[in-house]
Amino acid sequence: METRCYPKPPGAIPRAILASVTRHAGCTPNRDPAMTTPSALRPDPTAASTPGPVAAAFLAPWLGPLAFVTVLLWKPLAHTLAVLLHRHLPGSAGYLAGFAIGLAGAMLVWRGLRREEHAATCLGLAGGLLIWIGWMEYAFVYFAETMRIPWVTLPDGTPALPPQFVLMQGTTVPVLLILYLTLVANRDTGCRAALWLRRRLHLNPGAPSPAQRPAYARITALEVIFVNWFMYLVLVTLNDPRVFGRTHPIQYAAFATFVLWAGYCLVARMPRITALPLALRYGVGVVGPAWAAIEIGSYKGFWTEVWIKPAQYPVTVTAIALSFAALAALVYRQPATSQQAARGPATPSNA
């Protein structure tokens, strides 16, 4: 009688029975190669490969500072773009260009509403930046011109505060009310500043609502807009000669405060972040005081604002633009799945 060797049955048959059957049939049972390979030659599944320099930059402790630098580099480019638009597209052409830039930002935010956290955060960040420079800044300039708001001048007649900043001062109370209603009085907020304020004032808004998927694109865009708006109001108040002025000693105190504030977050908080989307959102809030310190330093002559003089410093401005483009591309293409979404007590909370 001919003896046949059949393929290995499904794994539901115990290994001992399978070995007995195949042994009596005169054939050798299939063996797992991993069982016959010497242990010294087997790859260790728990051993982590050493990441390259680019991959290592997207891991803690470098991930947070990298996100901070990426967001920070946009600030001088935004000033350069504003200077070029006002210089080469005056009047109605500039307003149309601003409207188009803001519209592009709004479309990016809308596109990010259905994307996962990483892409949604990147699209919301880009959209918020474009909305601010295209719609917000141009809106203040347009309405200041149409309402013929005059410059604020020094006693000797020297212009000190442009009309659009005077108009912006009128939004101080509405902005504070909006921030209160959307952050402090919101029991579902994740804003660290609002949570800190509530703890200090012993305010308890009640239990959070049932967990829902956050709209990260909208959250990030709103953070960009309101951080810019709030810091603008602070700087305008400091520079207003009717309040303090650029020569007032409080400028040095404000400079030191902003440096310490941003420095603490950058050194003590951001290196602990292990998720790239969270690092970007947290970086938006840290860049606010950091850029305010840079602005005050330029007023005091600590350095030159090369970004508002692109014709005089083309190499520097080009280097800033290329650096931002390279970092932005790396950040956007970095897969979110490679990051550990840590939101424990040791990691700054979601913003």
Image (cartoon, helix red, strand yellow):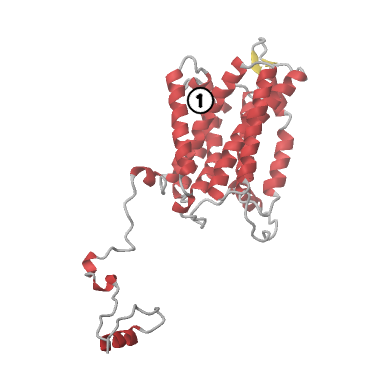
Q: Where does the image place residue 222, in percent across and percent down from the top left? A: 64, 41
Left or right of 193? Residue 37 is left
Q: Residue at x 28, y 75 (%)?
A: 31
Residue 40, image quadrant: bottom left
Q: Amino acid at mark 1?
A: Gly
Q: Nearer the viewer, residue 313 or 171?
A: 313
Which residue is more in the foreground, 65 or 136?
136
Residue shown at 49%/42% (left/top)?
332
The secondary element bearing badge 1 is classed as helix
**Which residue extends farthest front?**
1
**Residue identifier under label 1:** 297
Q: Quadrant of the N terminus?
A: bottom left
Residue 156 lies in what quarter of the image? top right
Q: Residue at x 76, y 19 (%)?
A: 146
Between 73 and 333, the residue placed more toward the observer is 333
Tell me the residue at 57%/39% (across/down). 125
81 relative to 109, above or below: above
